[in-house]
Amino acid sequence: MDPRERSGERVTANPAYDAETLVQRMTRMFREEWEKPFWRDLRVNVSLDFGYYTGTGQYDPAVRTKMQEAGKPALTFNRIKPTCLVLFGMERMNRYDPKAAPHGVEDKPVAEVFTRLIRKVHRDTNAEYVLSDGFEDGTICGVVGFELPIDYSREVTGEIGFNTVRVPEEWMWATPWKRYDLQDTRAMWRHKWVDVDELIALYPTKKDEILEALEAISSPKPEDASQRPVTLSQGDPSDAYGSGDLGTRPQDDRDFWFDEKAGRVRVLECYYPVYTPVWILSIDGGKRVIQSTSDVRMRRILTELARRDPTRSLTLIERNVRTIEMCVILPATEQELESGVPFETDRHDYPIVPFFAELKRDEVQGIVRSLRDAQDGVNARKSQIAWLTKATGDGWFADQDSLVDQSAFERDSRDPKGVYLVKKNAADPRRIQPPNVPQDLFQTLQFDEDSIRITSGVNASMRGLRESDESGVAMARAKQQGEIITMPIFDNFKLTKRLIYEKMARRIQEVYTDERVVRLLNPDTGEDEFVTVNQVVEEPDPAMSVGVRRRVLNDLGTLKYDLVLVETPASPTQRAATLATILDLLEKVPAATPILLDAIIELLDGLPEKVVQRAKKWVAERTEAPAGPPPPKVSISLRGELDPSTTKDLADGSLDAQPDAAQQMGAELGNPQNPSGQLPKGGGVAATRPDLAQ
């Protein structure tokens, strides 16, 4: 297949494209993305952001060394980490559990099983920890990725995993793009340095091929004409997504792909779209649809249907269906190690889900990026104040040759020098008078600390601190205002979680395809129970008098058509908020208490499971529809023996559902107002009967 067809590239007249293989094209695109200003800036800023968060990178190493050599303090008062920890705590206190909601009543049993299965995968993959870890990374540096691979190394059917992917250390994508989920990007890459020994262990069948190719590039000859200088284009500095040069080859930049000294190579895992034409025949305005990848076959069907019934509405539509394919390549040797479709149940979307803390046009940043300048100001002012109070307020002035043990004075002093010798004037050693620290330094320090709170939106109330004499109401409102400022980050993360849960559902569909017994947690009893999924059973076919049909119980494949994913609150904060809302409602509508009592009990933390179940049972018994009155009991007492004919009629049921004689008489008389026939006369027929005439 043409590499341009596999990667969705349009056919052009560019000789460089015509001569490219898929490996060459993916290698070139990745190398050009690596050199674009967007990724260069992100690599620098991500490292700085984490350094400012931990506090270890808030000083340039050269500046810190210079200050230490001069005896000046280089203090770090980390105000960024507590600010970030508040946001991390808010995320942990507002977690959600995934839930499958049915579209119809018939889907409810499958939806309940699927919800329990999603939560099992959620628990088995430590999803809460992974989500929180990814939220921290994304909030600090601006972006992080989540992936849900399927591992076949231990289980034949596969095991679902859940991991974070660091950007740009492990994951990059083609720029530019517009969609939050990155589904409109041209390609994605997972890049990683891999030891040659490990690479051979992963691909044992390609051992000789890999070693031979690496040996060929290990010692390039100087006289080789192919050893041209690197010609990468860095693009327009004003364009963060500027394109690069097409002429760069791996052998031109060997050290980027192959670390011969360390014995490792850079491996690329590439994801790219492939577009396949599909023809769709719409019959009678879409009431019936036929789809095929063969246009000849579809045109033949169209001609035949039109010949049979010229009055039918027939429309032939051509569409391009996108499929995401994957290949693992070794750019240093231009080898393709494996390729294919990564997930059968998720063929149309990229496998990695991003989380952007802040995404505006071509700017991606986290909360730390805008706090770095204010943190630098805090460190500088603190260090300056410490220097002024330490350097000039604790030393000694002493006359020359007046001290017997000068080292004792130096040890007793916090001044860098300790003792300053002056011209002899017969005076005793005396303390240096401490100067007055300029008040402007304290004002500037306070301004920098306020800037961190204002810029981040995390105020003292969100930390549980009370400023001056503010009331509890004012503190609550300040906390609410701070939460509003930080809401965009949590909205983005909620969107990311929804995308993750959708992919988790598709991974379940791919792994749980056959009939199997799964241990799932019963939310009502709190105990594990064994449930059979995709169970095939035989039952009588109602369409046939004789025969059976097969039906699948708990068919997980119906998720695509009958189920949607929603979220229900799972954290104490969300439960408390929901409980407060219900209690407020009950104050206005007290009559609703019996209906909502079980929900209130379930939202209370710390109650034993037996108490919750008893409350649910009590509410269920009182909210059931009242049973109607029992049917009246009719007692018929017959005296004497029945005649043989009556006994026979009662035994064979011949008297059942027989019309009453009086009703027959009334009907025969043709009087609709007298169906019982109790009147001696009436109706048009009565006049013709001699026995009723007067």
Image (cartoon, helix red, strand yellow):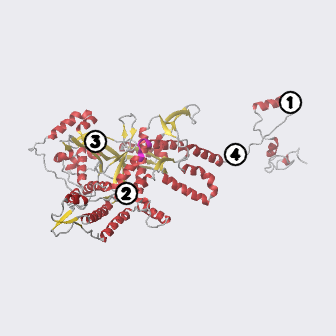
Identify residue for label 2.
82
Q: Nearer the viewer, mark 4 or mark 2?
A: 2
Q: Secondary structure at mark 3?
A: strand
Q: Nearer the viewer, mark 2 or mark 1?
A: 2
The residue type indicated by label 3 comes to Val
Q: Residue at x 38, y 52 (%)?
A: 135
Quadrant of the image occupied by residue 401? bottom left
The residue type indicated by label 1 comes to Glu
Q: Which label sits on residue 627?
A: 4
297 left or right of 559 in image:
left
Identify residue for label 3.
328
Of the image marks 4 and 1, the number of the one nearer the N terminus: 4
Q: Residues within 10 Å of mark 3 (few under 14, many from 20)?
A: many
On screen, residue 501 above or below 440: above
Q: Residue 339: tell me if it is visible.
A: yes
Of the image marks 4 and 3, the number of the one nearer the N terminus: 3
Q: CA distance from mark 2 to mark 1?
A: 99 Å
Circle 4/circle 3 CB separation < 8 Å: no
Magenta span: 123-128
On screen, residue 529 above or below 36: above
